Image (spheres, grey):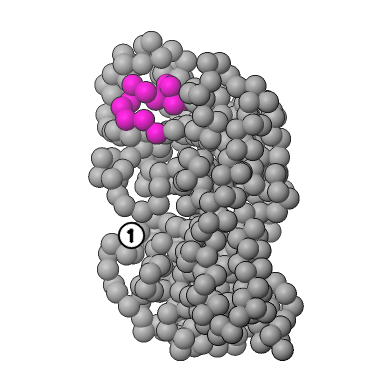
């Protein structure tokens, strides 16, 4: 059974799409509707959504920004974009964020339902056994193995920073426009007890996931690992949108979840920072490998960003006691920031993470480990407790209370309130 979220600032369009979906014969469990990006984010945080159908232009938070935020929360989320504008730039941004289709208003009902069915069929794929997966790779992914000479040079680059410039020159001479950059980051995927074929399968999953948008260069390294270099041009790096740490976080968690899902293979993903210049690629490889080592201390976490551990603050590798003290401080600062800003419309985990200079993934992990509940549950708790206080102790109207605790729509506020307390604001007032 599927859960679908439909987002459009025109209520009639939401109603029409829901009517279409409700009579489509699809195995739909729940249909949720939201009239702006902020409402949609609440559903994405609180419900198990399989498919997001969103308009592009919706006031303060566009459909593109909603997709950014949605992919950061759930990198595996499927999305279909609808728009009144047949604009290449919008379509390009939507596809870059993983949209499965881009449909132009006024919508053709049959075309819309065909698109939804195609997406949900891919969501509903049974996870194959490892043997079936490998057979599929043999039959369907007849991709070339990484060129051995190139792999040797890249491993030399990772292993010998002193010869980085000469190795980069050799790569450039042998493989023209191979690493144009000039900005780079490295992902290292450490596989657990894998065969050569599983390593090959993981490499191809990485290449398919990252596609050409990130200029990925994937190759085998030692210890059953796969390394992937991604790169940005000057123009791409300067693009407005989600922060680069958020991009790395999203890609790392997508890579981890896809390998775990399709290969049924435990893995750990280490992510480097971003540096400018191919001569630093070796250093980035060291960072990605170093980040993975924190899995020894945090077995329950599978994705590690080098910058989360603030290595530069310590003369040598920090002790567990030093890391615990720092992590406690991060959680305290996050709670303090939320306590001050919980009523802010559009508050996101990623904003709180940026204030702490850590990735959203790591902040979520620390917050849950320290407090026992996730960060957004804490935001909801503060909002609901304050709204309850205002209902019982003031004569403020529902829309005024909704505004004071960070909700744009009184109707949406009432839905969240009833879900939290089991009764509506009106019922509590009585």
27 versus 376 height, above or below: below
User: How dense is the environment of label 1, judged by Cα within 10 Å: few (below 14), some, or many (20 and up)?
Assistant: few
251 versus 48 height, above or below: above
User: At 33% across and 34% down in the image, what residue appears?
Assistant: 183
> Residue 32 in the image: x percent, y percent?
58, 77
Tell me which segment is drawn in magenta.
274-285
User: At 70% across and 54% down in the image, what residue appears?
Assistant: 373
Question: Looking at the magenta stretch, what is its main secondary structure?
Answer: helix
Toward the viewer: 300 or 279? 300
| Residue wearing tag 1 | 92
> Residue 60 in the image: x percent, y percent?
38, 69
User: At 39% across and 25% down in the image, what residue appears?
Assistant: 281
- Looking at the rendered image, the quarter that the C terminus falls into is bottom right
Toward the viewer: 165 or 138? 165
Circle 1 — which element? helix
Toward the viewer: 31 or 385? 385
Q: Magenta segment: does it hold 279?
A: yes
Q: Examine the image and state in which quarter residue 131 appears.
A: top right
């Amino acid at each position: 059974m599927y859960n679908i979220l439909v987002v459009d600032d025109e209520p009639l369009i939401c109603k029409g799409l829901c009517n279409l979906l409700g009579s489509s014969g699809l195995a739909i469990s729940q249909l949720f509707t939201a009239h702006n990006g902020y409402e949609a984010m609440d559903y994405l945080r609180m419900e198990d959504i399989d498919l997001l159908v969103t308009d592009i232009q919706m006031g303060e938070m566009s459909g593109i920004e909603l997709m950014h935020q949605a992919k950061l929360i759930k990198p595996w989320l499927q999305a279909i974009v609808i728009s009144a504008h047949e604009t290449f730039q919008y379509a390009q941004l939507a596809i870059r964020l993983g949209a499965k289709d881009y449909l132009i208003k006024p919508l053709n009902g049959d075309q819309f339902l065909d698109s939804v069915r195609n997406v949900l069929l891919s969501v509903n794929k049974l996870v194959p056994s490892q043997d079936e997966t490998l057979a599929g790779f043999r039959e369907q992914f007849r991709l070339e193995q990484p060129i051995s000479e190139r792999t040797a040079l890249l491993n030399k680059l990772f292993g010998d920073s002193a010869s980085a410039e000469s190795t980069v020159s050799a790569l450039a001479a042998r493989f023209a426009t191979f690493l144009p950059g000039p900005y780079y980051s490295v992902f290292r995927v450490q596989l657990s007890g894998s065969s050569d074929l599983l390593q090959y399968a993981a490499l191809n999953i990485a290449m398919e996931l990252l596609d050409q948008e990130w200029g990925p260069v994937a190759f085998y390294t030692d210890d059953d690992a796969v390394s992937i270099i991604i790169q940005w041009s000057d123009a791409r790096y300067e693009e407005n949108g989600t922060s680069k740490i958020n991009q790395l976080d999203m890609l790392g968690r997508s890579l981890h979840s896809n390998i775990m899902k399709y290969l049924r293979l435990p893995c750990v993903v280490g992510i480097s920072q971003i540096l400018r210049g191919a001569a630093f690629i070796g250093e980035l490889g060291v960072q990605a490998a170093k980040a993975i080592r924190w899995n020894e201390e945090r077995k329950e976490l599978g994705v590690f960003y080098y910058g989360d551990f603030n290595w530069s603050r310590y003369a040598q590798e920090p002790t567990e006691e030093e890391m615990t003290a720092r992590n406690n401080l991060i959680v305290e600062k996050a709670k303090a920031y939320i306590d001050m800003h919980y009523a802010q419309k559009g508050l996101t985990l990623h904003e709180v993470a940026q204030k702490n200079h850590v990735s959203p993934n790591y902040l979520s992990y620390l917050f849950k480990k320290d407090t026992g509940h996730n960060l957004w549950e804490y935001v909801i708790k503060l909002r609901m407790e304050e709204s309850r206080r205002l209902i019982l102790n003031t004569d403020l109207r529902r829309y005024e209370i909704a505004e004071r605790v960070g909700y744009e729509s009184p109707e949406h506020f009432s839905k969240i309130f009833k879900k939290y307390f089991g009764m509506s604001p009106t019922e509590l007032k009585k």
